[in-house]
Amino acid sequence: MNVRFLEAFVWVVKLGSFKAAAEKMNTTQAGISSRIATLEEQFGVRLFDREHRGVMLTYHGTELLPHAERMLELQARMVVAMGQTDAFSGMLRIGVIETVAHTWLPDLFSRFAERYPNATLNLVCDITPRLRDDLLRGTLDCVILSEEITPGFIDNRRIANLAMRWVASPSLALRFPSRRLLSFADIAEQPIISFNRESSVYRNIAQNAAGCAKLRVSYFSSIGAMVDLARSGFGTALLPPAVIQQDLRDGRLVALDVDPVPIALPLVASRRLEPTSPLAEALVGMAQTSCDQFLSTCRDDARAP
């Protein structure tokens, strides 16, 4: 029996369609249908109910699923044990928040490609709530985001806690009171550049916004746009120093001392446990190394205590 046929069966069930399974396995929908048909012919039973729209397992399909998953997991662990990483192919779908994309993601992908040269990567860059939903739906295999995901079939690994700092252009910083420690009310006197309202970073602003009558917040989904606007003097931005190391060194942006200190940004690598993906497991393990190496080259204030 061809294990790839069992893999096609499992992915059709997990992703809910033949099309999604074809995209996952980097093949055609017709190819997936052919593999399922071959399985059904070999077993002499129907695995899917063709009379219903969408994917619906028959009794025999339901019985086959746990056995197929165990066989795939055993094969994957056998290949890893033999050190045959070149044997891994197919596509790994990973989602990351922009903070990761602008810092240590290139190093992570380079490490991954060196170890798994025949695998391909499909990257989605988005905010944490959407990445979480995509992982739970099964359209992503692993994500690096800013909060843990609670369901039991997800494995969460804390990678780091990144410090957050209020920053502004030197010209805008001169408009703030001359005392060293600023309050949030002082920050609110000038326009604020913020991440999307759905992001965890926005909570730093929302928790302190009460009573600030002049609060003017502009929301952006692009961290690159936020940095450019902060440089131009458009407003004060709440950003991870890890993302703007060169701007801080060169004086294009200055960090402001503000009370209360902004809440740190967690970086969490999460992956699906079912079905087991050795590629996702390996990438999550490499993420810690890439993140640590990057932060070792940053200013001391990049990593939160």
Image (cartoon, helix red, strand yellow):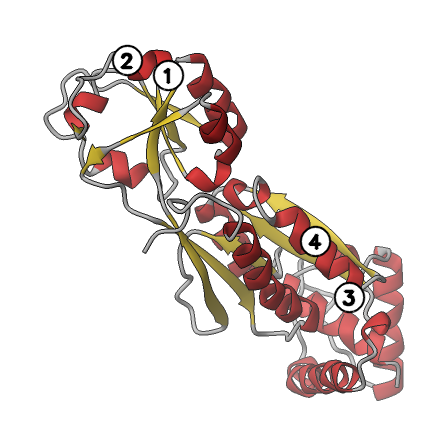
Q: Amino acid at mark 1?
A: Pro
Q: Which residue is mark 2?
A: 174
Evaluate if marks 3 and 1 touch, with contact meaning CB atoms under 8 Å apart. no
How far separated are the C-alphas under marks 4 and 1? 35 Å
**5 left or right, relative to 224:** right
Q: Identify the image quadrant of the N terminus.
A: bottom right
The reply to whether discs 2 and 1 touch (Cβ–Cβ < 8 Å) is: yes
In the rendered image, the quadrant that contains the C terminus is: bottom left
Residue 9, given in percent of the width and then of the height, sits at: 75, 73
* Residue indicated by mark 1: 170
**Residue 115 disc label:** 3
Say which element carries label 2. loop
Q: Could you tell me which residue is drawn at 42 percent across and 23 percent down?
A: 253
Q: Residue 266: image x %, image y %?
A: 39, 53
The secondary structure type at the circle numbered 4 is helix
Mark 1: few, some, or many residues within 10 Å (few <14, many ≥20)? some
In the structure shown, which secondary structural element does the residue marked by tag 3 occupy?
Answer: helix
Q: Is residue 283 left or right of residue 197?
A: right
Measure the C-alpha gap from mark 3 to mark 2.
50 Å
Mark 3 / mark 2, whichever is N-terminal:
3
> What's the residue type where badge 4 is placed?
Phe
Q: Amino acid at mark 2?
A: Leu
Of label 3 and label 1, which has the lower sequence position?
A: 3
Q: Residue at x 18, y 39 (%)?
A: 260
The percent coordinates of residue 237 (x first, y second) are 36, 27
Residue 221 place in picture, x, y as percent: 48, 31
- Between circles 4 and 1, the one closer to the viewer is 1
- The numbered mark, 4 or 1, whose residue comes first in the sequence reads 4
Does residue 236 lie above or below 40 as drawn? above
Q: Which residue is label 4 attached to? A: 109
For the point 27% across and 39% down, the residue is 204
- Closer to the chain start, of discs 4 and 3, is 4
